[in-house]
Amino acid sequence: MRVAILSRGPRLYSTRRLIEEGCKRGLDIIVLDPLKFGLTIGTDGVEILHRGEPVTFDAAIPRIGHSITRHGVALLNQFEQLGLYSANTGDSIRKSRDKLLASQILAKNGIRIPTTAYVRDLQDVKTAIERVGGLPCIIKVSEGTQGQGVFLRHTLREAMNLVEALLLTGKAVLIQQYISESHGKDIRALVVGDRVVAAMRRRARGREFRSNFHLNGTVEAVDLNEEYVNVARRAARVLGLNIAGVDLLEGADGPLVLEVNSSPGLQGIEAASGVNVAGEIIDFLIRDVDFADVDVGQLLRTNLDQGVLSLHLKHHPRLVGRSILELFSLGDDIPVFALARGNDLLWNPDPELQLRFDDILICYGEFTALRQALKNAISMGGVPTLPVNAEPESVF
């Protein structure tokens, strides 16, 4: 198998380790500079060239730096169109790099994060600080890495001056809750596939509050309990990342996700944990290469007449306590193929299952008939039915 490591630094520790472990396993490893790719897009197909020449490989491990995120995402999207496997997709990297977007996704999925406010005007700063728990507070830009663009401010005047300066440079500014019990330290959990393969605690030196290894912070091994492990796994999962460094704060009430890194460095965590993380990544790649991620949302939109709709029970409390069968009364033709309940996804749920307030029904079929059936279920004005000639058909 030929594997391309997308990296601008072939001599960097992480790149060298991936090459080393790949070669040990008999893989043909090549290092390609992401900025040397050219892309051609047309209705007749798409093409990629590297340094002006065709290039072939079976799988890619992206090591895309923050400064070239936009280009890297475009490149990985092109790979996806060509059916080429990438350990992390362009969309997952895009989501993780935007701290505001990542926070929105994490919070929507019930993953605890420090309270965060997005500000675009100086007049909003005082209110934002109050909303996140008061001073001191963390001020950060929406895009940054290795602790860059992250500041701790103790007074309103200091915070106002900093936000003003950042806004004048066109930065998107976030004001975030300060977790005092985690000052100067955090935990980095390295997720590969669906496992946390290694973890370390990072500590800042001196008066520095940022604990990043690249800011001269110290690292040490740490054994994570099940709660921390599951939070890290879920954070990587909801952002769509197969390889991720999940940064966790040790809050008084349990772990909070601070950030999720799509190209985590390997040097500090291999040294601290003693785990062969590069080997874990290569082994995962070998196992997973035949199962490339699919953008299901885009796939569904290719069919104009059929697709998937969801029904959130919390918006329709009159349906709570009823069964799926009561809602549709369609026997084998019930158009519900999954039910989201908390952190679980129930495939082909039992029609007799009683619905709860936070449930989400995921239904499939022909749009016109499906929308009518769901409207009938919502109104509960009678026994809702789908037209006889409109049998739901899965688009998967």
Image (cartoon, grey):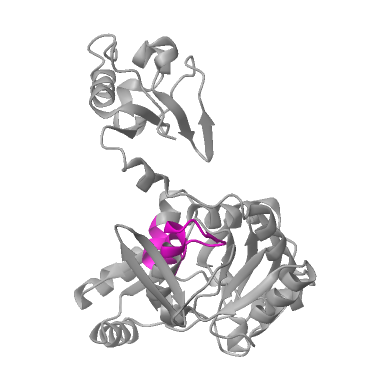
Tell me the quadrant of the picture where the C terminus can be found: top left
* Residue 184 visible (yes or no): no
Where does the image place residue 385, in percent across and percent down from the top left?
29, 12
Q: Is residue 204 left or right of residue 94?
A: right
Q: Is residue 219 left or right of residue 38?
A: right
Q: Is residue 277 left or right of residue 154?
A: right
Query: Camera-side residue: 262 or 213?
Result: 262
- At horizontal 69% and vertical 51% (from top left) the residue drawn is 226
* Residue 319 visible (yes or no): yes
250 over 140 or under it: above or below: above
Tell me the quadrant of the picture where the N terminus can be found: bottom right
126 over 319 or under it: above or below: below
- Quarter of the image holding residue 395? top left
Q: Which residues lie in the magenta part?
A: 78-104
Q: Is residue 14 left or right of residue 361?
A: right
Query: Camera-side residue: 204 or 37?
Result: 37
Where does the image place residue 152, in percent across and percent down from the top left?
44, 81
